[in-house]
Image (cartoon, rainbow, N blue to C red):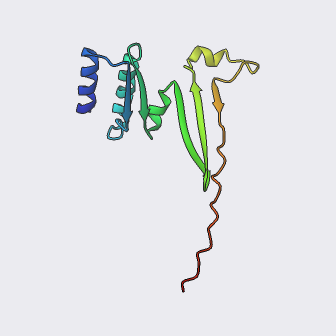
Amino acid sequence: MTAVALLFAIYMVKPSPFALLDELDAALDDSNIGRFVDSLKGFLSQSQFLIITHNQHTIAGADIVYGVTMPEKGVSRILSMRLKKIGVEEIETADATKPSSIETEAPTLKPRRERKKKDAPAPK
């Protein structure tokens, strides 16, 4: 948490327009993950963050989520979800005719063609 605090202190002095954070939250427990996500949201007016993570609490705090899955060997599936902010008022007044609060686009990539093996000449 000390390294995260140092990073955020630097951002308070001189914010960057963009930051890439790779598994920065991996060593944090659940209570500190919440503080981390809240701190990130405080910097969103000045910066954009691209976070690489496996933590479900960090993912839940995101506006847009991109992911890659592999449903079967050799086939990758790219997922993107735009998560809108859902408040209590929006949930209570939700209507079935309105679009869902989660928009999903999931194109599937075709598997690579297998290379044909050339017959090697027999040794003489």
63 to 89, vertically: above or below: below
Q: Residue furthest right?
A: 97
Q: Residue furthest front?
A: 124
Q: Residue furthest bottom?
A: 124
Quarter of the image where one finds residue 5: top left
Q: Is residue 101 left or right of residue 64?
A: right
Picture coordinates of residue 89, whole percent (x, y): 59, 14
Give the camera-side residue of 31 and 104: 104
Marks counted in the figure total 0
Q: Residue at x 54, y 83 (%)?
A: 123
Q: Residue at x 41, y 17 (%)?
A: 44
Q: Residue at x 58, y 82 (%)?
A: 122
Picture coordinates of residue 83, whole percent (x, y): 57, 25
Quarter of the image where one finds residue 52: top left
Picture coordinates of residue 41, whole percent (x, y): 41, 20
122 to 93, vertically: above or below: below
Q: Residue at x 41, y 13 (%)?
A: 45
Picture coordinates of residue 74, whole percent (x, y): 60, 54
The quarter in which the C terminus is drawn is: bottom right
The quarter in which the N terminus is drawn is: top left
